[in-house]
Image: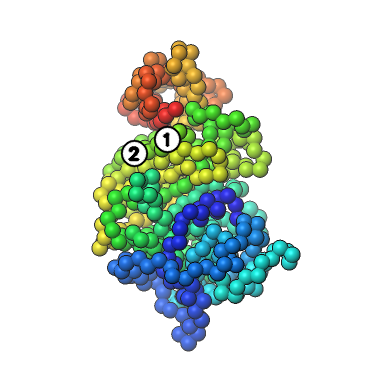
Amino acid sequence: MNRRAFLMAAGLGSLAAALGRGGLLAAAESATGGELFSWDILKEKAKALASSAFQPSSQAMPEALANLNYDQYRNIEFRSEKAIWSGTEQPYRLELFHDGYIYRDPVSIYLVENGRAMPLRYDKAMFDFGPAELRVPLPDDAGFSGLRIHAPVNEPNVFEEFLVYQGASYFRGKAKGQTYGLSARGLAIDTAQPVGEEFPVFTAFWAQTPAPGDQFVTIYALLNSPSTTGAYRFTVSRGVDVVMEVECEIHPRRILTHAGIAPFSSMFFFGPADPTYHDDFRPRVHDSDGLLIQTSEGEWIWRPLVTAKHILYSMFSDEAPSGFGLMQRQRAFEHYQDTNATYEKRPSAWIQPLSNWGPGSVDLIELPTGSEYADNIVAFWRPRQPLEPGRGYEFRYRLSWCWDVPIQRRVAEVVLTRGGAGIPPKSRYFLIDFAGGDLHAQADEEHWDYVVTASTGFIKAYTVAANDHTNGKRIGIEFHPEGTKEADLSFQIRKFGQPVTEKWVYRWAP
């Protein structure tokens, strides 16, 4: 239990657990060996659920569970010897989270084998409740709030957690050698809209027992909220990166004009490109430092994250996305100087659509924040056409929890953005370092074009110079806001009309 888990669950309200506490504690159907289960059955379940009105949970959580404080809840640990698939040759182990504290709606969890699903019954013997003198008497009819997957991540035969589902439709992953950072979600609805955001919930999970020799594990989930239902299938494999093949079918209960597909939530407090000042010993504090987009035409866009005093909403329109993700590019300890948070080890996360998502936009939302303890960054794909009730919408994509974008490419990337006051009064000066690709090749430099723009204000001058420290190029831009409160700046090097670098796109919003 950490600040990320707390923030994901806090303030979400009491959304229904579609299968309910009663379904969770129902006796296993030993006579039939459980219920028939398949991906098609789950999709039909989600479709049928959408045809009826949303029913909030009518059962209140017992006070003993609801009144657990942070430390009391943190003391409740699943016993590793009770892990699902423990003692087998399976390359994965599954453990469960207790409900209580801020996790008020228990989820139903089933184990699937040979096409049948058996409910996992709650048993206190599954958990260690911490030191005896600190334990709180809890009821026998408690339940689960989520699950996590373990595997030999860093050492052979040592099972470590690398994937977690807990809180609304949030889940997190991390690659080898990483710590947790940003989160993914099943679906975002009305984020940063006047009506207020709605948080759909994964109300039930089905874990498929891997077949002998499988190097992947499959998790199914049912999503429910007042506005929609959905069926999800996550096929998870891991090497250095954790790679998830995600399939979902969404069935709206109402018209969804602001549905976010494959959404991420992250934190950006401050950095050297950010115009806000923080009295802090650390040079930067963030889980992600930029949004990376690959357009349908193959162009790469890098948008450094910032923190403003008001909500910033950016849209990058496209006819069909090739990929996008929130990245953590700064990987040296010196960039953060924080031995506890180890921000240099936070994951990047990349989405690659595996089906035709159609026209829409990659939306980036940057919220004001006064600390590093709140997720203030949201990114997702928003379809151009609203999602309508009475229809099912399918989306397939690959989600990689990684150190860097899992695609080989020749363009140079933005390795650093810095900003500060310019020499002329009321001007701003930006430094952009590009490195990699063909920037080290000087022979064709005379054929390079420099494309620089400002949506408002004006750019008076820019410079291009070699940076021997990065074996790349350093760009200097003198920008005059001219009283504007917000402006989009961009810079890119091209050769014969083809990109040599990523397109740097920056939002000036003091």
200 is higher (above) or lower (below) than 444: below
Q: What is the quadrant of the N terminus in the image?
A: bottom right
446 is higher (above) or lower (below) than 306: above
Q: Amino acid at mark 2?
A: Phe
Q: Which dot marks residue 329?
A: none
Residues packed near mark 1 inside 10 Å, few (<14), some (14 to 19) or many (20 plus): few
On the question of residue 381 being in view, the answer is no
Which residue is at the far bottom? 31
State how far apart marks 2 and 1 are (Cα): 20 Å
Q: Which residue is mark 2?
A: 316
Residue at image position (35%, 20%) is 457
Which residue is at the far top? 424
Residue at image position (41%, 74%) is 37
Viewer-closest of 481 and 176: 481
Q: Position of residue 353 (x, y in %)?
A: 37, 50
Q: Position of residue 101 (x, y in %)?
A: 57, 60
Q: Position of residue 503 (x, y in %)?
A: 39, 31
Q: Which residue is mark 1?
A: 310
